[in-house]
Image (spheres, grey):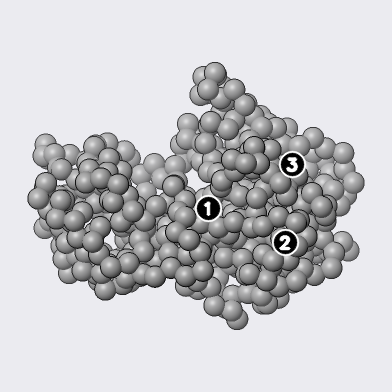
Amino acid sequence: MIEVNVIGAGLAGSEAANFLANHGIKVNLYEKRPNFKSEAHHTALFGELVCSNSLKSKNLDNACGLLKEEITHLDSLVMEASKASEVPGGDALSVDRDVFASYITKKIKENKNIAIFYDDIEKLPKGINIICTGPLTSKNLLNEISNLTGEKNYSFFDASSPIVEKDSIDFNKVFMKSRYDHKDDSYINCPMDENTYKNFVNELINAKKALLHEFDTKYFEGCLPIEVIASRGVDTLRYGPLKPVGLENNGERYYAVVQLRQDNLVGSLYNLVGFQTNLTYPEQKRVFSLIPGLEHASFIRYGLMHRNSYVYAPKVLDSNLRLKVNKEIYIGGQLSGVEGYIESAATGLLAAIYCYMNLKNISYKDLSFNSVLGALVRYISHTGADNFSPMNANFGIIYRANKLPKEVVIKNALDAIDAFKKQIIWTVQKQNF
């Protein structure tokens, strides 16, 4: 039986291992946790969500929503797990992170074609490898990749939000509502008047921050620490994560609103939306307790920062997510230069699909960049080498998306996915797996 090594059991690695194993390929899955400590993880589960429990929009007219539908068509394990663990989140797909990761872990462990090894891989095993070690890839493995490609690796800092117990929130000062009354009252809203808001901003930008080691403070613009956003101007938060638009309550409008999103199925935990932070833990407790309703909040988890590493994809990856210098090494997930949970899962899945096709010597056409996933991979592998930075799913990278009606863009994307999938299905049926 053909064997493939999948390094890392996060979203991308779990998708890769699951696809290959389900298509008759023996998978050796390597995961360093729990034997080796991670900077950001809290459990030993596969597919653990670190920064947020939100997988962003469910709507097809949103690029990430369309990407989710695309990988659903490709039998994504992550999307399967999200359906089993979904919690109320308005237009966003939010999940109970423990149920979500437990579902993925169970599926992987029960698959007879997957052998699991708990080890921190510093040197790639012989044979075919799909590297899905994510943003926290060890230095030694990063050095090995760099030695193979002749290119240095890059990194930026990312941050996660605090989580509080619902029962510790003062509901005399907050209200339940989704923005613009969409679908359900799934958010807890903490309203602020002008004086409260300005005092909060002042304390936030002057609060003590945790020291960062080893790397400079280059942040990813899509996930900035809230204190960094606040430092860009007193009203910046009011036009960002604390915007009050669509959150009127009984006819009353507010100067700013902090939102909390349900974090688990039973609804006992809520995370502060957009409150990624690098403040010290005591300062988080002090400053975030200034938010109306959170004066006596019990923090189950404080926010933290972690390093995100990635390869310089245009220089080192081909359109099949393989190293240009070694076609037996694939890279999926955030290490490949994409940013976001779904983007990571999607590229792990696609790397496995390409790996499977190449192993079976099947002639195929690359996934069209009429799709979000195809466009995302084309972007990271073909963008100008001097201008590269990690990329989220967005309509701006899809071919002619700005010149076509949105419904046509959506149809073209899903048609492209289905046409690509037919190549896989035909192969599976022919091989009788």
* Label 3 environment density (alpha carbons within 10 Å; few <14, some 14–19, many ≥20): many
- Can see residue 248? yes
Q: Nearer the viewer, residue 251 or 326?
A: 326
Q: Nearer the viewer, mark 1 or mark 2?
A: 2
Q: Where's the N terminus, which quadrant? A: bottom right
* Residue 107 location (% of width, % of height): 63, 64
Residue 205 placement, left or right of 40: left
Quick one: 97 or 149, which is closer to the camera?
Answer: 149
Q: Earlier in the sequence, mark 3 or mark 1?
A: 3
Give coordinates of residue 4: x percent, y percent: 80, 62
> Furthest-bottom residue in view?
35
The label on residue 319 is 3
Instruction: Please state which amino acid type lies under the numbered disc 3.
Output: Ser
Instruction: Using a 10 Å C-alpha cutoff, classify the residue at mark 2 as few (fewer than 14 neighbours), some (14 to 19) or many (20 or more).
Output: many
Image-based side of 30 in relation to 252, left or right:
right
- Give the mark toward the camera: 3 or 1: 3
Distance Cα–Cα, label 3 vs label 2: 18 Å
Secondary structure state at the residue bearing disc 2: helix
Q: Residues within 10 Å of mark 1 (few under 14, many from 20)?
A: many
Of labels 3 and 2, the one closer to you: 2
The tag on residue 145 is 2
Residue 404 is left or right of residue 209, and the answer is: right
Secondary element at image label 3: loop
Q: Amino acid under label 2?
A: Ile
Kindly indicate whether the residue at mark 1 contacts the one at mark 3 (C-beta within 8 angstroms).
no
Q: Nearer the viewer, residue 134 or 17?
A: 134
Q: Which residue is mark 1?
A: 341
Instruction: Give the image quarter of residue 121.
Output: bottom right
Distance from disc 1 to disc 2, alpha carbons, whole Å, reads 23 Å
Residue 229, compared with residue 66, is above or below; it is below
Q: Secondary structure at mark 1?
A: helix
